[in-house]
Image (cartoon, rainbow, N blue to C red):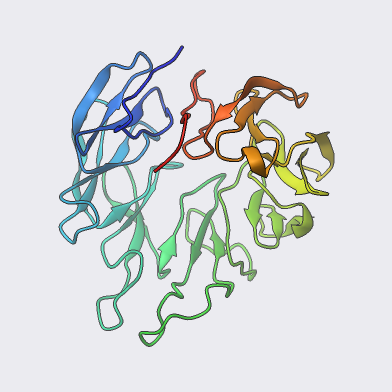
Amino acid sequence: MRIRLEPSQDATSFAEGLAAVSRGGLWGYIDTSGAWVIPPRFTTVQEFSEGLAAVGTGEYTSKATRFGFIDRTGKFVIAPQFNLALPFSEGVAAVCTGPCLIPEPKGPPTSWGYINKAGDYVLETRWEHVGPFSEGRAWVGEMLALVGGKLIDYQQPTERLIDHTGRLMSDARFVIGMPFSQGLAVTDKGYVNRAGEVVIPRRLVGESFADGWAATAQGGQAVFIDTAGKVVLRTGYQYAESFSEGLAPACKNDREYENGWGYIDRTGKFAIPPQFHHDSLGPFRNGLALVRFGTVD
């Protein structure tokens, strides 16, 4: 099955049977047949998660932009009122009502918290940025972009792990923390468990785990490891990404990087020959993956 979009259109991968697609500068959602389920009328959108999607009204990135949450009919179930919002995960969504990305030196403080599907705050944190929950954990941290109005080192460890009550799981700090998958999360120190302990060292860190394996690099080639850190597949290719529905994006070398991506199976053989551009190369969901042919402006 293929759904071909116009060159002027952008799209996201399918999630819960719907994909966000742009038309004429606005966004809506299509189903797996390519039919519009929610006509384009939003300035910015996110994927559906747990039956809801965060969408923005007003000019994108302007101070007038407000995010709310719609259901699968396109109806707002949580009114647009947030400066930024992340998708729902494990029953809650991270939302921001202040300067969400880079605070102004003399402006109001960043204000992130977590709401439930009724739009009520269930966890208000003192952290200046927060991430989605995964396997009972979320990464939270301090904003280091500005101190006294000046940019400072981004490589300072600020990320901490909390549970659904806001309790810190350990004293460990990281530069970066990714969502958990199969009990492990990617950090700058390696793969950590839900207690924040490094269980697979940094030398093997790579993609998040999916379908039991994670893509990483060893000896100049892409390999896949299991959750014990054991190499289970040596691809012979230079690049590879996580598996989804039994297939993983891969590319043989730098010379083919832009339009030389295809999908390999779990034996390392190309099930879909290299032909795609790396940008917008998505995971398979319900038998469909978002791909891009040709050059990218």
Residue furthest bottom in the image: 148
Residue furthest front in the image: 255
Q: Position of residue 75 (x, y in %)?
A: 18, 32
| Residue for point 18% across, 61% down | 63
How many numbered marks appear? 0
| The C terminus, quarter of image | top left
Q: Position of residue 202 (x, y in %)?
A: 75, 59
Q: Can the viewer see residue 241 in this picture? A: no
From the viewer's perspective, is 158 left or right of 188?
left
Q: Is residue 202 above or below residue 14?
A: below
Q: Position of residue 271 (x, y in %)?
A: 66, 19
| Residue for point 60% across, 28% down | 244
Decide which of 57, 223 is in the foreground and name it.
223
Q: Can the viewer see residue 297 in this picture? A: yes
| Residue for point 48% across, 61% down | 166
| Residue for point 25% across, 20% down | 36
Decide which of 244, 7 is in the foreground and name it.
7
Which quadrant of the structure image shows residue 39?
top left
Q: Position of residue 66 (x, y in %)?
A: 20, 52
